[in-house]
Amino acid sequence: MIDAKNISKKFKQQTAVDAISFSVNEGENFVLLGTSGCGKTTTLKMLNRLIEPTDGEIFINQKNIRNENAETLRRSIGYALQNTGLFPHYTVAENIAVVPKLFKWSKEKIRARVEELMIKLHLSKEYYDTYPNELSGGQQQRVGLARALAADAGILLMDEPFGALDPITRTRVRNDFKNLEEFKKKTIVLVTHDVQEAFELADRICLMDKGKIVQTGKPTELLFKPANDFVKTFFDEQRLQLEYKSVTIKMLWQFLNDNGNIESSATEIAADRNVWQALECFSLNETDALIAHKNGITKKISYASLMNAFNQYKKAN
Ligand SMILES: Nc1ncnc2c1ncn2[C@@H]1O[C@H](COP(=O)(O)OP(=O)(O)OP(=O)(O)O)[C@@H](O)[C@H]1O
Ligand SMILES: [Mg+2]
């Protein structure tokens, strides 16, 4: 759906983005990850021509965006800015309605859409006519998300959409957003410097450093098959937790013994749950075994067989 070919951006002497190429499939969540200044925002802004590349071409739905009207292109792509970018002199409703208004939707249709999104993003009705500076940071972030979703574009560009929030609020806003049907069906390019967030949201991660792509792949590929030492070191601090969170029971299935003979308490768990969630089940429910099903087969899994399967999976990958 999105094809970036050898794109570069130079600002005077500095090369912010250095001949990078990537493709994003329809419906995919593609996460640009990297430390501050590595060129994430610049890359994202080139996708809707807020920044023009110095070199290279970008295709969206096979059309070279250079040949499209920049305004029309921008309206057709949802965009959530770093630091919300809300208009301070617009109310919450007016902020959410910016793009639908440009599309000249009727007043009734706009109102209905704004109300629908406020409910979906857990913004109380009473904020309809409120100005952004009277809202908390988390609420402002929710308005920014609602605005990006408003015109129901197929593509969504999101720049640190949960940034600048405390960890608890950040997780809450992120989870609410992740559970939206609208989120699930869109093609999304999301920028973050937060490793956990990248792993939670990404189908594929594109890890950047100094304007270049270091590795693109599924979260498990970056973890278990790092392209070089930079990739390896980047995840080292949180490695164990990331590994537990990115490997599901389904992925371990062939290595899991069936401990059908355990005669004690057991807890059902869905096979698409990850190892971290399975471990939580053991510790929170004080259960001796988990019961999982896949393709009509049921396995009773002890703590020891879970850890054993996880280690075998790691060796095999
Ligand atoms: N308008 C500009 N003029 C000159 N240099 C710029 C401009 N915009 C960005 N840069 C430079 O390009 C580099 C990449 O910036 P960019 O904003 O893309 O980084 P980023 O990865 O989004 O960082 P952060 O995580 O801090 O938002 C930086 O070194 C920055 O100083
Ligand atoms: Mg940025």
Image (cartoon, rainbow, N blue to C red):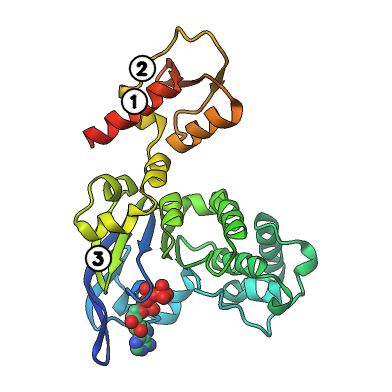
Q: Where is residue 56 in the image (x, y as percent from the top left)?
A: 21, 76
Q: In this view, does 269 lie to the left or right of 218?
A: right
Residue in the picture at 24% in, 91% down: 13
> How far separated are the C-alphas under marks 1 and 3?
35 Å
Q: Position of residue 260 (x, y in %)?
A: 44, 9
Chain-order first, disc 1 or disc 2: 2
Q: Please name the residue that numbered disc 3 is placed on.
A: 213
Q: Do the residues labelled 1 and 2 touch (CB within 8 Å)?
A: yes
Q: Where is residue 52 in the image (x, y as percent from the top left)?
A: 32, 83
Q: Which mark is residue 166?
A: none
Q: Please name the residue that numbered disc 2 is placed on.
A: 257
Name the residue type under label 1: Asn
Residue in the picture at 64% in, 70% down: 137
Does 105 sit above or below residue 315?
A: below
Does 307 sit above or below residue 153?
A: above
Name the mark nearer the viewer: 1 or 3: 1
- Total marks in image: 3
Q: Nearer the viewer, residue 65 or 274?
A: 274
Rendering quarter of residue 8: bottom left
Q: Which residue lies furthest to the right in this view?
A: 126
The N terminus, quarter of image: bottom left
Q: Position of residue 74 (x, y in %)?
A: 45, 75
**Pointer 1 residue Cβ closer than 8 Å to ligand 1:** no
Q: In this view, does 275 lie to the left or right of 180?
A: left
Name the residue type under label 2: Asn
Q: Is mark 3 on a helix, strand or loop?
A: strand
Q: Please name the residue that numbered disc 1 is placed on.
A: 308
Q: Which of 103 and 50 is in front in this view?
A: 50
User: Ligand 1 appears in which quadrant?
Assistant: bottom left
Does 45 sit above or below residue 26?
A: below
The C terminus, quarter of image: top left
